[in-house]
Amino acid sequence: MTGPYPVRQDGATGDSSLSVTGDSSLSATGDSSLSAAGHFSVRADDVAAHAVHVEALAGSVASAADAAASVQAGADAYGELCAMIPAALGDLHATLTGTLRTASTTLHDIATHLHATADDYDATDRAREQVFRTIRNLL
């Protein structure tokens, strides 16, 4: 295992234990399972762990946006001959800083949704477990 994500059976690294093959069928790697009928299992702990990685990435991107916002070339940074360069770069700089902020916000939103998904899987598992206990107790 390298980095925060498992190494797939094909040697590539990725953030998903499911991949789509050329024939549009799903194949599972790692600890997830996929039956011939196309059913798969999800480990809520893995989803929550992935959410933590996404949150960390969002924090890094936010730090990059803060760093980008704190530096900007002054009007005389390129001398008199190239005085128009800071103005031209200013618009690009603002666009890139805004894009980093948007990316950070989006990553935070994704992490929030991943945590909610993990919670939903846990709640569903607990509810199904209770149903099966009730059925077993009736037998």
Image (spheres, rainbow, N blue to C red):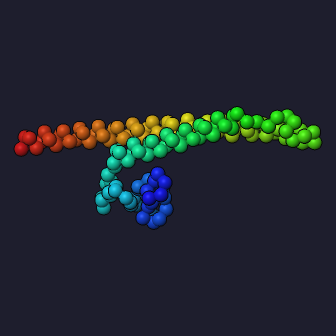
Residue at left offset 32%, top offset 51%: 41
Left or right: 54 as drawn, with respect to 122: right
Along the viewing direction, whichever of 139 and 10 lies nearer the viewer: 10
**Is there any visible trace of residue 27 in the rendered image?**
yes
Along the viewing direction, whichever of 136 and 65 lies nearer the viewer: 65
Q: Residue furthest left?
A: 139
Residue at left offset 30%, top offset 40%: 122
Instruction: Give the image quarter of residue 76.
Output: top right
Horizontal and vertical percent position of residue 70: 70, 33
**Is there any visible trace of residue 103 in the rendered image?**
no
Residue at left offset 45%, top offset 42%: 52
Along the viewing direction, whichever of 15 and 136 lies nearer the viewer: 15
Residue at left offset 40%, top offset 38%: 115
Q: Quadrant of the C terminus?
A: top left
Q: Residue furthest right?
A: 81
Left or right: 14 as drawn, with respect to 28: right
